[in-house]
């Protein structure tokens, strides 16, 4: 079995799919906080992926965005953020930096400025700590554009923010009054 980066990228995408969006695709069950049993996951994964505990541990450790977490007892795994399945990560709300960023594509800007940032199919709107990360996120969708979010004012106005295990700020919705196009 080759252990090229490409293979682990495929495996990582598979883990994102089943741990964030579609566990039923392989008959996997997530618990209410999004955890999957690693032994069950390995058993139900397509054989061509050659998933094993070692491979999973390697992917978790080397994930550029730290997308996944293994439980302290080593038996379970979950995605740190990005879910569309209705699970509760049980994050406690905390105070974000005064300004955070959202990277998107130019074609979405008009709608966003009208309706605000909506979580779409995911459970939260995702916000980045820095312009560089926001630009990367935006590029996934097309020509990138960065919006600044006045998180300080949102907190003052009673909006809740949550910090995922891998440093993505999450919130339910960002109304347009808190958004500006970044210079
Ligand atoms: C846009 C990646 C029209 C929103 C990243 C985005 C992130 C609107 C798209 C994580 C809108 C949703 C999430 C509105 C928002 N009208 N479009 N009112 N409100 N949008 O992929 O934030 O690599 O669901 O701007 O790093 O791009 O997968 O969200 O362009 O943390 O680990 O609707 O996914 O992480 O797209 O990305 P997404 P996102 P991973």
Image: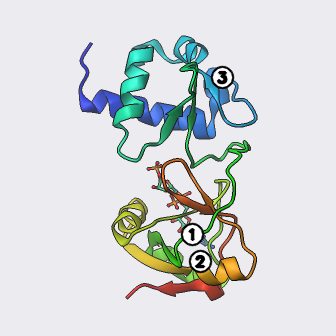
Badge 1: residue crowd in 10 Å (few <14, some 14–19, many ≥20): many
Q: Secondary structure at mark 3?
A: loop
Per the model, the C-alpha gap separating discs 1 and 2 is: 7 Å
Which residue lies at the image location 50% right of the left edge and 37% below the top edge?
68
Give the quadrant of the C terminus.
bottom left
Residue, disc 1: 96
Badge 2: residue crowd in 10 Å (few <14, some 14–19, many ≥20): many
Tell me the mark number nearer the camera, choosing from 1 and 3.
1
- Residue 14: x and y, percent? 48, 31
Residue, disc 2: 151
127 versus 78 height, above or below: below
- Residue 27: x and y, percent? 67, 21
Task: Assess whether mark 2 and mark 1 are in contact (beta carbons under 8 angstroms).
Answer: yes
Q: Earlier in the sequence, mark 1 or mark 2?
A: 1
- Nearer the observer, 1 or 125: 125
Q: Earlier in the sequence, mark 3 or mark 2?
A: 3
Report the label total.
3
Give the quadrant of the N terminus.
top left
37 versus 109 height, above or below: above
Residue, disc 3: 28
Which residue lies at the image location 65% right of the left edge and 30% below the top edge?
35
141 versus 80 height, above or below: below
- Residue 33: x and y, percent? 71, 37
């Amino acid at each position: 079995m080759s252990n090229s980066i490409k293979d682990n990228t495929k495996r990582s995408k598979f883990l994102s799919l089943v741990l964030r969006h579609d566990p039923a695709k392989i008959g996997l069950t997530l618990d209410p906080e999004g955890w999957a049993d690693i032994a069950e996951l390995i058993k139900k994964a397509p054989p061509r992926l050659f998933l094993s505990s070692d491979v999973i541990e390697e992917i978790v450790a080397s994930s550029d965005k730290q997308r996944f977490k293994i439980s302290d007892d080593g038996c379970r795994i979950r995605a740190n953020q990005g879910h569309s399945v209705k699970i509760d990560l049980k994050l406690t709300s905390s105070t974000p930096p005064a300004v955070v960023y959202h990277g998107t594509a130019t074609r979405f800007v008009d709608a966003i400025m009208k309706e605000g940032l909506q979580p779409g199919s995911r459970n939260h709107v995702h916000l980045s700590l820095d312009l560089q990360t926001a630009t990367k996120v935006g590029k996934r969708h097309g020509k990138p554009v960065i919006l600044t979010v006045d998180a300080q004012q949102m907190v003052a106005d009673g909006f809740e923010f949550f910090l995922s295990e891998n440093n993505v700020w999450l919130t339910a919705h960002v109304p347009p009054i808190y958004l500006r196009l970044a210079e």
